[in-house]
Amino acid sequence: MPKQTQKKLAKQVKKLEGRVSHYFKENPKSLINQKQLAARLEIDDAVERQLLAAVIESLIKQGLLDEPHAGKFIWKGPLDEMQGIISFNRSGNAFVEIAGFSKDVMIPEQFTGKALDGDLVSIRLLNSRKDSGRVKGKVIDVIERARETFPAIIFKNEGRFYALPDNQKISIDFYIPNDKLNGAKEGEKVVVKLVEWENMRLSPVAHVTDVLGMPGDMKAEGDAILAQFGFPLRFPSEVEKECEAISHEITNEEIAKRKDFRKTLTFTIDPADAKDFDDAISFKTLDNGHVEIGVHIADVTHYVREGTALEKEAQNRATSVYLVDRVIPMLPEILSNQLCSLRPKEEKLTFSGVFEMDDKAKIHDTWIGKTVIYSDHRFAYEDVQEILEKQDGQYEPELTTINNIAKILRANRLKSGSIAFEKTEVKFNLSEDKKPIDVFFKVQKDAHKLIEEFMLLANKAVALKVGKKEKTGDHAKTFVYRIHDLPDPTKLKDFSDFIKRFGHRVDFNTPQNITNSINDLLTKIKGKPEQNIIEMLAIRSMAKAEYSPNNIGHFGLAFPFYSHFTSPIRRYPDMMAHRMLFSYLNGGASEKIDAVDKLCKHSSLMERKASEAERESTKLYQVIYMQDSVGKVFDGIVSGVTEWGMFVEIESNKCEGLVRLRDIDGDYFIFDQKNMSIVGQRTRKAYALGDKIRIKVEAADVENRRIDLKLV
């Protein structure tokens, strides 16, 4: 067997051994057979099942597993080793969150081993419990790397090349052999791939995979953000070739299989700079006085077939990423901007939800199925808003009718307990060379809400179609739901205590009271200085929405059934929903829940990574925008407090910077976590979340994406 294959196999066995050990340690009383264990670990690959048998034998020989009954295994090893995700701070120390522990386990710098920020690690608790009872631990093993590629800057030391990672939570340098520089020069920003780390005393070895450019170059900085969160910088050639081979022709045979909406008035409403139009609205007045409103979604899965490289790439990416200066699409542009985009004056294949409604927004009939459409017009949100406000313009009667129905749908939704979050988005006007020249705030108006309501309606309709049981005792078929759990009571209490300082009181005793109280609060704070900070903390107090085949409903929307169906160009779960829905409409059997669950977990993870990448991009552009404001004084609001400083949001432009505790003159300040404030030890002067202060911009550091502020 080749050495490379042996190493790969050994790595697989080690990883699987960690997963098996982790399962039994989490379930020490579990007595299960190999088949049950494979199901728990979601192992359905024949090779991996063989490896599982070998791992079980190995653990028995090590005395870690026992076989009290033939073919059934139970853990008998120590339980002091635990697994979790490791998070580093800039000092080099790290923390691992362990289920059942009230506090994270602290890992001192000398005990972090070969772990890097975000890795899944195995730790062992240490006996010492000094430092206010803080539980400490030591990394025993790295079970799984969070990532293998890292954005970094090349530097030279004593004739050898190294890469310094962008991520300040990674305190080691990577050694780059001369023949693995890939053309990179000293000082350039690159992406490196970790190859091996055999000796703890030496730097890990890495190879340069991509040369991005010089630090400060906008494309290089954006590419570095993508690499930081594991998003590929290009599509594989195999995927591009598959795209080129896809036929653009819509045949009469295909049209015959679908409901034809080409003669029904249809239009799209999107941002002015959008290129991928994955939804369209159709409108028709019926003879009975009702209206028929169709929500037509690009039929992406007609073109992206299972088993192809294109499908695999979409699955891996799981989402498009929206940086300030560009979109990194989930699908190649030939699909996302051309073939699947519902462009005006072109026939397109779609998957639709069609609703017969009266003027009170009551739904009298719903039809869901494959369609073909012809978009008569492409609107920007601003165009529709102007038409609605002036009551004049192209398709004004139809737009007004649709808008009136959307308003009723929204009012009914809020009355049922949906939360009306409308957080202000910070946007930048960019110059031709992609530099920020102005900042503005994107506020939702009727045109945005119109589209939002009908997308919500379609998403809810498809989830109901699959998930709602017709008879007691029926089994609903497996589907992909967008779920949102009830908020954590501790977070709600902290939020309730915080807003009291602004004179606001809320009742969080029941789920209905939570939504009513938050909606009342959001209405009261509109236009007030504390609006942004309270809205931000209200969102943080909520659970995170995610994808799952196990439906628990969507708390924030107050929908018992909700899915994502309306954006298959940019979200993989929507493609999953399309496939399953079409199969079920045609009598298909229910999908295996384990396989769907695995894809849902991956999609939720990639969605979180995309959000983090988008925040980093916004942060980068805020820093560049503030470079011309160094030395200027602004009004700000304390938006966050930590043990090393307080974050301040500048009121006029929503840019956020840091005031370091060590830079506050006249006293020694410490972090008071209970009251979310910093307090001067001599003067007892306190700065708390939400306080208004004046600050001066000291520096705008592009390399570290940080704005340094000083109290005035």
Image: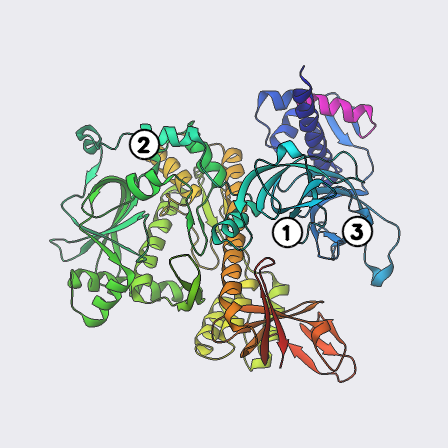
Residue 93 lies in what quarter of the image?
bottom right
- Give the residue at mark 3: 109
Task: Between label 3 and label 1, give the one nearer the viewer.
Answer: 1
Picture disc at residue 586: 2
Residue 333: give x, y in percent of width and height. 35, 41
Which of the pair 24/473 is nearer the observer? 24
Q: Is 55 contained in the magenta span? A: yes
Instruction: Please indicate, yes or no, whether residue 418 appears anywhere in the rendered image.
Output: no
Main SS, magenta residues: helix
Q: Quadrant of the C terminus?
A: bottom right
Which of the pair 502/492 is nearer the observer? 502
What segment carries the magenta color?
Answer: 51-64
Asked which secondary structure carries label 2, the reply is: loop
Which of the pair 473/227 is nearer the observer? 227
Which of the pair 680/629 is nearer the observer? 629
Task: Between label 1 and label 2, give the one nearer the viewer.
Answer: 1
Q: Is residue 611 left or right of residue 576?
A: right
The amino acid sitting under disc 3 is Glu
Residue 35 lies in what quarter of the image?
top right
Check the image and report above or below for 8 versus 289: above
- How far, Cα to Cα, is label 3 from label 1? 17 Å
